[in-house]
Amino acid sequence: CAASVKDERHPCGVAERISGKVAARSCHHCGMIRKLAVLTAFALAGSAFTQTRPHNFDLLDVRWHVSLDEPTASLIGDVTNTLRPLAGATEITLDFGSLTIDSITVDGTVAPYKHVGDRLTITVEKPTDGIRDISVRVRYHGKPGAGAYFVPAERAYPAKTPVVYTQGEMVDNRFWLPTYDYPDDKATSEGTIDVPEGWFALSNGKLLDKSTKGGRTEYHWKMDHPHATYLISFVAGPY
């Protein structure tokens, strides 16, 4: 692979003349390099999703309810994470952004917590045995800085209608949904979206129910196949 024609070189140094023009001619060496590059790219991509983050529980289910207020770009949330802590766990840590926490309970009992940055550490006061599941409920409100996006009608294109949507991949759901937000644990999920009457809300899985009262409509969705939490999503608007 050392030859060249008119100083125009193939990446590995091989070239040939075809119809008076210089054209690259692949060789076994180049083919091997290309194959190696492709395999390396796949390996790097795969490693990003096979890495694990230490946590002392198995997330089983995420049941969430959000009420959307499009004019103020804010929401009110109520999320219950069902999980199975390891034996001897005294606290569990979830991912959560800077929204305001209204209350936290563990199995119905008010629980102490610390909220530093996007880490929400909750005290588990009853002993855990590695077998028993617990339910951690977080109520909160605020304006998400990421993960959930409120687009007013004047900014929408091409349709001039408002829309609210989420984009959680890879770790942005934490900014509107308190849960374990890393793709090395999978759980089922169940979501209810409260929107103005006349809006439609789409989410994961199967639509179980729709109900309207007092000018508001709730859409109740359920995904019964375990999945990474960044896949939890919704889209809502007057459609």
Image (cartoon, grey):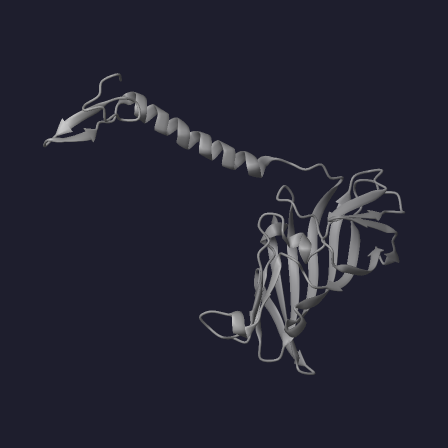
Number of numbered discs on residues: 0
Viewer-proximal residue, 62 or 230? 230
* Residue 37 % position (x, y): 41, 29
Residue 151 point in image, percent of width and height: 57, 68
Residue 237 picture quarter: bottom right
- Quadrant including the N terminus: top left
Residue at the extreme bottom of the image, as rendered:
214
- Residue at image point 83% right, 44% down: 91
| Residue placed most toward the observer, 208 or 151 | 151
Q: Quadrant of residue 167?
A: bottom right
Give the residue at the far left of this rendering.
Answer: 19
The residue lying at 87 percent from left, 53 percent from top is: 111
Residue found at the far front of this picture: 7
Identify the residue at image location x=68%, y=37%: 53
Res 211 quadrant in image = bottom right
Query: 201 and 11: which one is in front?
Result: 11
Residue 44 placed where, x, y %?
Answer: 51, 33
Q: Is residue 48 left or right of residue 40?
A: right
**Residue 67 appears at what percent x and percent y?**
69, 69
* Residue occupying the point 49% across, 32% down: 43
Compared with 215, 133 (above or below) is above
